[in-house]
Image (tube, rainbow, N blue to C red):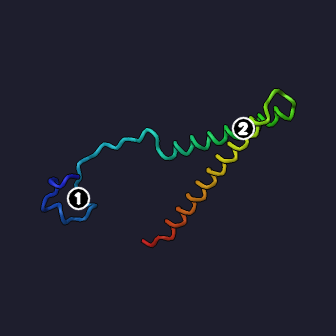
Amino acid sequence: MALNELTSANRFSPLVQQKFPQQEVTKAENSFADTLNAFVGEVNEQQINAKELTEAFIKGDNVDMHDVMIAGQKAKTSFQLLMELRTKGLDLYREVLRMQV
């Protein structure tokens, strides 16, 4: 809302009663939920990839040991990051619940 749109009659009325010009609301291309879902999907793919490489190594397929270890560490690190995000999100939620209105 631009400053020149304020009128003397509208300036001191409650916000609920004020008339604002209609603004078109568009959905962002990548919302937070979409980004979070994509990250969870990537973590899941890394976990599955590490599992498959480990099983192939155990079966004796032609898989290098360092590839198995790297895939396992990537999966572990991304899962730890996901758990930290979850913990921070829960802490934020609890903090909002404690706020007094």
Identify the secondary structure beneath mark 2: helix
Question: Which image quadrant for residue 7?
Answer: bottom left
Disc 1 from disc 2: Cα separation: 55 Å
Question: Which image quadrant for residue 44?
Answer: top right
Depth check: 65 or 87 in front? 65
Lateral position of residue 85 relative to residue 63, left or right: left
Lateral position of residue 79 relative to residue 37, left or right: right
Q: Quadrant of the C terminus?
A: bottom left
Which amino acid is tagged 1?
Gln
Question: In the displayed image of the protein, which residue is found farthest to the front?
Answer: 66
Dot 2: few (<14), some (14–19), or many (≥20) neighbours within 10 Å?
some
Name the residue tied to disc 2: 48
Dot 1: few (<14), some (14–19), or many (≥20) neighbours within 10 Å?
few
Q: Residue at x 64, y 42 (%)?
A: 43
Between disc 1 and disc 2, whose residue precedes?
Answer: 1
CB contact under 8 Å: marks 1 and 2 = no
Depth check: 95 or 13 in front? 95
Which amino acid is tagged 2?
Ile
Name the residue tied to disc 1: 18
- Circle number at residue 31: none
Question: In the displayed image of the protein, which residue is found farthest to the top?
Answer: 62
Q: Residue at x 58, y 54 (%)?
A: 85
